[in-house]
Amino acid sequence: MEIPKTYDPKQAEQNHYERWEREGFFAPEINRDPLAPVFSIVVPPPNVTGALHMGHALQHTMMDVLTRYKRMCGYRTLWLPGMDHAGISTQMVVKRELKKEGLSRHDLGREKFVERVWKWKQESGGQITKQMRREGASVDWSREKFTMDADLTRAVREVFVRLYDEGMIYRGNRIVNWCPNDQTVLSDLEVEKVAQNGKLYYLRYPLKSGKGHVTVATTRPETMLGDTAVAVNPEDGRYRELVGETLLLPLTGREIPVIADEFVEPEFGTGAVKVTPAHDANDYDMGQRHSLPKLIVIDGQAKMTEAAGEEFVGLDRYKARTKVVEKFEELGLLEKVDDYEFAISKCERCKTVIEPLISTQWFMRMDQLRDRALQSLQQDKSPQFVPEVPYEKVYANWLENLRDWTISRQLWWGHQIPAWYKPDGTVVVARSEEEAREKAGTAELTQDPDVLDTWFSSALWPFSTLGWPEETKDLATFYPTSVLVTARDIIFLWVSRMVMMGLKFMDAEPFADVFVTGTILDAHGQRMSKTKMNGVDPLEVFDKYGVDATRLKLASVGSTDIRWSEKQVESYRNFANKIWNAARFCLLNSEGATINPATLTVGPNSALQDRWIVSRLNKTAREMRKALAGYEFHEAVQTLYHFFWDDFCDWYIELTKSEISAEEASAGRTEARTRLLTVLEQSLRLLHPFMPYITEELWQTLPGVSSALLHRAYAGAAPSIMLAAYPEGQSELIDENAEWEMQAVIDLITRVRNIRSEMNIKPGERVTLLIGSPDEKLRAVFNANTAQISRLARAAEVSINEKLEAPRASARAVLIGGAEVAVPLEGLIDFEQERQRLGKEKEKLSAESAKLEAQLANPQFAERAPAEKVEEVRARIADIAQRNAQLDQNIANLG
């Protein structure tokens, strides 16, 4: 049978995915075994506004590898897809759309605005789900979920009501992170700390007694208008006598006390700190301890309030800062201003500087949930983090320091908080407005306008998507899920919250394992981001190199951070071409043959190469199962690559080529072709979870492919490699002796080929091989395989003896087991011409080495060049030294 000379990835990508989805291969129902073990996994729901980026492609590849592998192992697999409504992000996208039309959300009103968001979602949202199909993601689209679906909304309300009834959700006045741009509160995890150069202002506050002043240091002079105390450390001898004294707060006409609090660090500034309880989280806590007033001088628009004073009301906070400093200078109360580097809090989305404000919000108490999650980790080591170090400790440390969670957001898009207010302000929390009316005894109710933090609904994802609070069959079958594949940056935002909610409402962790992927950095080692414009579009890489090659590169990342390199993707595209060409050779020489697993049962009388490839196939299958069980993706990719390229293509096909390509039909030729096809078919199965498209494309062309090759769990299904059984790795077929013998033959042939290349022996020239080995067993191996050695090393004669005796003008090499091989050079090459050629090559390399040595000796290069560039130069110098040593040996061989 013949297939096209070259592989066309796009055709395979289009044809097979549609068929897989249409045939229902992605759904767990395809598995007909009632006793099948279960494997389930949920997609970390991407934002509905999102487009596929490298982080998604990386995680999706690893999840798909696991899902396809488990499916081939006969598991009832469910990989559940879905999207997150992404409150702030989505609202901002639609606001920008409205702005183009000269409208704001307030022009539409809440109801019409939410309708507009839903319309946008239907028309423009969810691009990422289409892109996931391109990746080959074998998710069950029939179970796709969206966090705003009716059933998930019901789950959100059920959780809220239960937690409220237990006193774990409450409404209160507390200091929060406020984004003046997005006009909403943010949790601590939605705020990023950014180092910046600023100023430290030293302000003098006069003592009421007239006996001097106290100097405080601050980065935010405008907040002094809301100060209600100055605090010092009780152990600080400089201020001990001032505790209890009264200060005159400049610009305000107010008096404030000097208090003592252990939180104050005597080393910061002057050791005396201003206390603004309404505009700093630490000051708020101090204010609670000392019952200080909370004076709000900055509002939600980041402008000064009436409480800031007549001169400042309405000013932007930064203009107020300038004015405060000017006033202090005029009054002679500005002691000094120092340059100062400090961390500033910014909204992670819009990068606006956060304003800490006291606000009435909804909060969730986290102590009980935290304690149970910690207990589960400490007692049961659950969930199991991979890699364990450092992520288990990072997760535990964060839980130990967990504070109450601000769960309300001042948005219109999201799950509106299921709380209603009676005319007298009484709060009624219910699952629906109808239930709220029954509880309140009145229809005169107003629902809380705020929505829940997006992460609230995301925290329920592993069980809400399976039908909770109903006791569905899916929930009973697929919860808890098997593993979560995620990035390190959402361990706090999402992983920890899913664990806490799962333990609370399902009495079980949502997943057994958490695999934390590495991060793909740009070529310079920087994180990819929209703002840096250094991202790589995976769809462009798919177009250029094919999905399979890209997936193999992504899978090889594993848990390690790597720099993106298209050269590596190109090498995997070459690997895909190698697979295609090898399969094409097998198919071109398949007349009379068919896939027959019985040919892989070999015995001691079978040819060495057959015993060897069957052993290598089974050992590779065993290594693959071990690697995937331990989430060792990089090791799995390397194992596959070396088995298929080195063992199967470079050696087994070459070793069997003469028999396979024999012109006359014979039982031997048919058996050899059948075994070759069968090894190829098993190899494609090994590759399939990583390279689904090319493996399906080739598998469907193999003679003998039918539903009979499928795993027994898929009896009756249409034939597809994705339903074929993953190779077991049978220990009785692993033959260590055959592998040792074959390795000796491979080593000998490789050394002779190296000699031919280094000594510039023409490809058509037949050489004489002189082999010496004190090991009788090794001599027997070489004698038994003389025909293969002669053919592949292009030798006219092979002489094997206990001791090597060779002419002086011979090229030599040491083999495994202490053996040696020599190739007499007389008559093969022009000695003088070869000496001149080798001498010129040595001169050229020596000149390059001297240039590189000078570069390294230059202090400017060593200090300024990137570390990897310096290392590259050192590696090249070492390589040249090794090459020169080999050239010296080659010159010596010429006599």
Image (tube, rainbow, N blue to C red):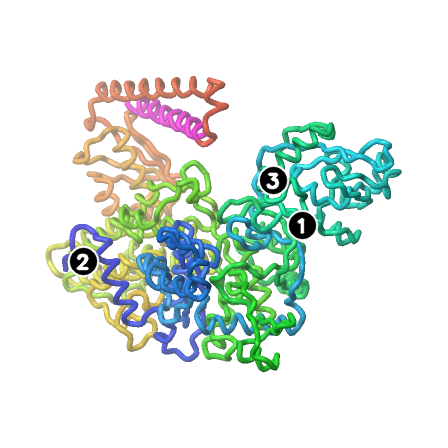
Q: Which residue is drawn at 46% across and 17% down?
A: 858
Residues under numbered marks 3 and 2 in contact, where contact means CB atoms less than 8 Å apart: no
Residue of label 2: 587
Q: Residue at x 57, y 74 (%)?
A: 445
Q: Residue furthest right?
A: 241
- Is residue 730 visible to us here? no
Q: Earlier in the sequence, mark 3 or mark 2?
A: 3
Taking depth in this image into account, of 437 and 872 the one nearest to the observer is 437
**Which quadrant would residue 501 be assigned to in this image?**
bottom right
Residue 371 in percent (x, y) is at 67, 63
Extent of the magenta region: 869-895
Residues under numbered marks 1 and 3 in contact, where contact means CB atoms less than 8 Å apart: no
- On residue 296, which mark appears? 1
Q: Is 654 one of the magenta-colored residues?
A: no
Q: Which residue is drawn at 55% across and 56% down?
A: 493
- Is residue 579 visible to us here? yes
Query: Callout 2, which amino acid?
Result: Leu
How far is mark 1 from mark 2, CA to CA? Answer: 80 Å
Taking depth in this image into account, of 252 and 335 the one nearest to the observer is 252
Q: Give the structural element (helix, strand or loop) at label 2.
A: helix
Q: Given this view, does label 1 or label 2 mark the residue nearer the observer?
A: 1
Residue of label 3: 343
Residues under numbered marks 1 and 2 in contact, where contact means CB atoms less than 8 Å apart: no
Residue 207 in percent (x, y) is at 83, 36
Q: Give the structural element (helix, strand or loop) at label 1.
A: loop
Q: In this view, does 285 lie to the left or right of 743?
A: right
